[in-house]
Amino acid sequence: MTVRLYSMGGTDNVLGNIQTKQGLILSDQKMLAGKIKVDIEFETKDLQINEEAELIFDYIDEYNFKCVGITGNTYKYEVKSCINGTWQYLRTSGLVPALPKEKLHIEVDIMPSYLRLIIDGVEIFSVNIMNSIRRTSIGIWASGGRRITFIDCDIKSQLPEVFIISQFGDVYDQLYDQIQRDKCFPLPTYDLSIANRVRVTVYGKILDKNYTQLLHADTELNMRMVFLLDKVQKQEVISKESFKLLKRQGLVEGRYPNIFVSFKVADIVGQKAAYIRNRGLEDDICKQLIVKALEAMGEASKREIMEVLENALPEVLDEGQKSKKVSNLLQAMKKEGLVAAEGKTRHAKWILQQKE
């Protein structure tokens, strides 16, 4: 496209015999990060003072924006920031007076805090932007007294590589699908236990690569499902409603709140041993272990029986829940006529029931 320059504020700037006009055009497309490509053609290779052709980004208004491109001032190439109408130079390169040719191909890579300028396939410079770039309109900026032509301007947005806090919803689901899912990072955790404060834990590495990749490779899992499974992976408590959702899909097992990933998940990622430890051995196997122990010991307290079953009880249970589990096993065996208790309460000793 060809830009016919106009004076900003209605006043021309006159430097010597050169009448300098300034103007900008904005695209409807907004961008936070991505790549901009354009061919810029000047009337001659020898640029005049204040003759500029640049790409605009981080645009707030005509007095507050950033731009990068070609200039006829002290340096050929620059990136600068206009703050309340005053220029601040962020990076410059290449001494004027002449360009290599009249028509140059410009590529600009932009990230929220980083920019790279490439001219005709050669990187001119890269620069860190101190103030993070915002998602705003992209445009072109030009200054001078002669014609400047911008040709085939191509703007391609891309999502930034990192985000920290997200919520559910169409936009955030899209962010997750395109960033977090590909990176296989566990989602952040949030601690709301202190009033008026949120504590966020961001994981900088994958906790379990095989397990996480399994979840992220399953395109049938939506954002919420992955979020919940991620919490199960971290051994965090989820709501009963969330547990029922995962249970219906066959993704978790156990009794709420002591839940763990299902066998089909554990089998695929090669964690069957961990699955068995979480699930515990079958009740019939535990009963056989108790019988074997009583045959060898003659009698045993409940505490001693718990020690015998230490590696057979589900790891997801706490001590109180394990104690209740053993009590239920002993009572069931008593009803079946396998064992009997001598004494009462916690001091009771368990023995094998004599067969008649």
Image (cartoon, rainbow, N blue to C red):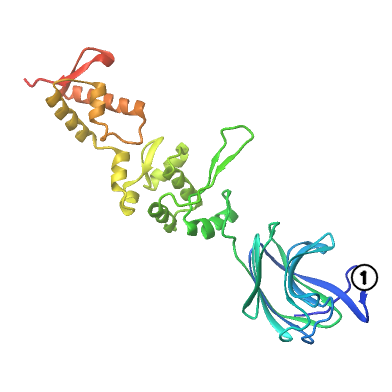
Q: Say which residue appears at 28% left-offset and 16% top-offset.
A: 346
- The quarter in which the C terminus is drawn is top left
SS type, badge 1? helix
Dot 1, crowdedness within 10 Å: few (<14), some or many (≥20)? few
Q: Say which residue appears at 27% left-offset and 14% top-offset.
A: 345
* Three-letter amino acid code at the position of disc 1: Gly
One can see residue 308 in this view: yes
Name of the residue lying farthest toward the top: 343
Q: Position of residue 101 (x, y in %)?
A: 72, 86
- In which quarter of the view is residue 66 placed? bottom right
Q: Judge left or right: residue 62 versus residue 196.
A: right
- In which quarter of the view is residue 348 placed? top left
Q: Which residue is mark 1?
A: 10
Q: Say which residue appears at 37% left-offset and 30% top-offset.
A: 318
Name of the residue lying farthest toward the front: 95
- In which quarter of the view is residue 296 placed? top left
247 or 303, nearer to the observer: 303
Q: Judge left or right: residue 242 versus residue 59.
A: left
Q: Position of residue 201 (x, y in %)?
A: 54, 44
Q: Judge left or right: residue 140 versus residue 106.
A: right
* On screen, residue 73 above or below 256: below
